[in-house]
Amino acid sequence: MNKLMLAGLAALAFVQAPAASARPITATDLATMRRLASPSASPDGHWVVYQLSETDLAANRRRNDLFLLDLTHPDAAPARIASTPDHNEHDPHFSADGRWIYYLSDASGSDQLWRVAAAGGAPEKLTAFTADIGGYLLAPSGDRVAIWADRDMRCVDIDCTGLPAAPAGQGSGRVYDQTFVRHWDTWAVPGQRSRVFTFPLVDGRPQGRGVAVAPHLVGDAPTKPFGGAEQLAWSPDGRTLYFTLRDAGRHEPNSTNLDIYAVPADGSAPPRDLTGANQATDTLPAISPDGRWLAYAAMARPTYEADRQVVQLRNLATGETRALTQGWDRSVGSIAWAPDGRSLLVTANEVLDTPVFRVDVATGRVTRLTRAGTAGNVVPLRDGSLLFTLNSLQTPDDLWRLDPAGAAAPVTAVNADRLAGLDPVNVRRFHFAGAHGDTVWGQIVLPAAVAGRLPTLLLIHGGPQGSFGNAWSYRWNPWVFAAPGFGAVTVDFHGSEGYGQAFTDAIHHDWGGAPLQDLRLGLAAAGREEPRLDLANACALGGSYGGFMVNWIAGNWPDGFKCLVTHDGVFDQRAMAYETEELWFNEWEFGGPYYSPTAAPIYERWNPVNFVQNWRTPMLIIHSERDFRIPYSQGLAAFTAAQRRDIPSRLLVFPDENHWVLKPLNSIQWYREVDRWLDQWLRRGGGDAAAR
C-alpha cells in the first residue's frame, strides 16, 4: 500500500485515535477544509486530474486549483498543474488521446476554455468569447466540443454576432411577460437562456463562433439552476449530441418536464425530442461505448420533483425503450457506463448512505459496490476498476479507487493534516417504530472528548425529500454542532429518501403529520438508545423544510424544547404559494395552486401562521435576501410574530446569500450566532434578556 493510501486511511481512522493535543472542530475549520471535486481520468487510466478548492478567509472567497496524480506509482504525490495565483481553474477533462487536460479558467478576466499538456508546460487559452462560458463537454472522438453559455435567444453564435445594441435611454427596468422572473438567487434577464453551441476542434482548438444546436427551442440547456455536464452526452463518433432541456413555455415554473433531445453536431437538422411522450422528468443521458444505447433516468409523475428516477435503456436504432431498474425501489442520482458496455455504474440513496451500484444491462440485476458513506463523481476505468469521491459525517470528500475484485482504498487524503488535530465524534445509527408503525432510521452524534450528560440538538433536514444521512456537509454539519459539548440527533422522517418511494411519497399532503410524529418518537428513541442525551435540555434546529418544521414545532410541540432555530423556513403557506419561484413544488405537495378550493384547506392545515397563538419558545430566525426559493419575507414575518408575542427572539439576515450560506465568513458568523443562542438557552438557562 502506498504512502498516500496509508495517509488516507489515517484520515478516516482518526475518529478512533484522537491526538493528545486535539481540540474541538470549529466553524472556521469547516469553512477552511479543502474541497475535492471533478475528477477526470486519462483514457488509459494512468492519470487522474481533479480540482481542489481552498479558502481565502481574508478575501471571503474560495479559489480552485488543478492537481494531477499518477495512479500507477505507489509513492506518487499529487502535483499542482496549470494553476495561477488569484484565479480559478476548474472542471478539468482529459482529451480523447490523453495528451491534453482541458479546463475552465478566469485568468483572462472571464471564464474561458484553456488546456495544458498532461506532460506539463505552459497553459494555452483556447477561447476568447465576449462573455463567460458556463461549461463544456468534449466529444470522445476528439474532434468536437460542446460549450454552453448564457446568451440572448436571438444570438446565432456564441458571440452574438450582429445582435443589435439595446436602445439608449430606456431606463433600468426589466419587462417580463411570463414567469420565471427570478430563479433560485438570480433575476432572469429577459430573452436570455443557457444555450449549447458546438465547435469543431482542429489540433484540439475550437474553430469559429459555434453552431447553436437548438436555435428554435426556448429553454435552458443545461437546465437551471443546477444542471451541468451530466445533462449532455456525445455519441462515440462525435456526430450526435444529446442534451436535456425543459421547454420554457408559459407554464415553465409549473413544469418538471425535462426532455432529452438528439441533434446533429453540425446543426444540419433540428433537434429530435426522444422522450416527449413522458410529461415528467427525463435526464442524465449516457451513451454506451458502442453507441447503440442511450441510458437515462426518468420520473413517472409530472410536477413531482422527488419522484423515483428509474434507469431507462433506449435502443437508438429502433427507439425501443425498457425500464431497466423498475424493479429496484431506489432513485438513481447518477449514471455512467462501464467500459465493456455490459453494466452501468449508478449512485442512489440507501438507508443513510449513498453507495455506488452496478446494474447489469442484460438483466437489470443491481449489486452494491461500496459500503458506508456518500459516494459520487464515479469514473469507470478501462481495467474494470473505478474512481469515485467518498465522504461521511466524519470526513470530507477524498478520491477512492475500487479495484476489479471489489476492494476499495483511498487515493487522496486532502484534509488529513487538518482532521488529525481535531477531537473526534462518535456516530451511531438507530431505528425505531415511527408513524404508521414504519421503521424509521436516525443517527446520534456525540463528541468523544466530552463526558457526562449532554444538552441535545434535534437537527431536521430539508427537502423535505432528502436525508440527514452519513454525509459531510459544509452547511449543516453534525460534527460541528456536537463539538462544543452537545449531543446531535438526526431522524429520517417520513418523506426522506433511501427507504423506497412509498416512504418518500408519504409526506405528500402531510407536512406536519407523520414527520412530526417521527421526530417526537425519534427523539425519545434516541434518549433510550443513549442515556447521555439530556432530552429535557434540548433545542430543535432546521433549514428549508426543516425551518418549516421548526416553525410548526413552535405552535404544535411548544413544550418540547428550550429553544428553536429556524433557517429559511416557511412561515405562511399562503404567501409562500404566491412568492416562491418553482411553483410545481408547492402545487404538488399541497394538491394545486392555493386558490384551488380543494388545495387551499391542505395549505392551511399545515400552515404555521395558524398556530402562532401557541408560540412561547425562544427562537433564532435566519434568512437571506437572495433566497428566492423561500423569500426572506417569510423570515421577517416569523420574527415579527415572535416579537409581537414577546418571545425572546433574534433575527440574522444575510444580504448576499441565497437559500444556502456559502461565503466563508458568513458561514462562520452563522455558526457563531447559533452557538451563542444554544449557549444562552441550553447552558445558561436563558441568560440575560438581551435577545428579547
Image (cartoon, rainbow, N blue to C red):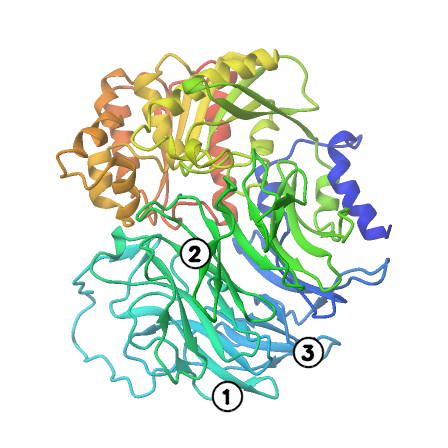
Tag 1 residue: 207
248 or 206: nearer the viewer: 248
Asked if residue 520 shows in the view, the reply is yes
Identify the image quadrant of residue 272.
bottom left
Q: Which amino acid does the dot numbered 1 rest on?
A: Gln
Determine whether, in the image, residue 247 is placed left or right of residue 442. left
| Label 2 crowd bin: few (<14), some (14–19), many (20+), radius 10 Å | few
Mark whose residue sits in front, 2 or 3: 3
Q: Which amino acid does the dot numbered 3 rest on?
A: Asp
- From mark 2 to mark 3, how far is it between C-alphas? 30 Å
Tag 3 residue: 97
Looking at marks 3 and 1 on the same chain, the residue that comes earlier in the sequence is marked by: 3
The residue shown at (44%, 37%) is 501
* Image disc number at residue 226: 2
Determine whether, in the image, residue 296 is placed left or right of residue 602. right
**Percent from the top left, x then y, of residue 673?**
46, 33
**Percent from the top left, x then y, of residue 549?**
36, 28
For the C terminus, the image quarter is top left
Q: Secondary structure at mark 1?
A: loop
Identify the image quadrant of residue 483.
top right
- From mark 1 to mark 2, how far is it between C-alphas? 28 Å
464 or 571: nearer the viewer: 464
| Label 3 crowd bin: few (<14), some (14–19), many (20+), radius 10 Å | few
Q: Which amino acid does the dot numbered 2 rest on?
A: Phe
Q: Secondary structure at mark 3?
A: loop
Looking at marks 2 and 3 on the same chain, the residue that comes earlier in the sequence is marked by: 3
The reply to whether the C-beta atoms of the residues labelled 2 and 3 are less than 8 Å apart is no
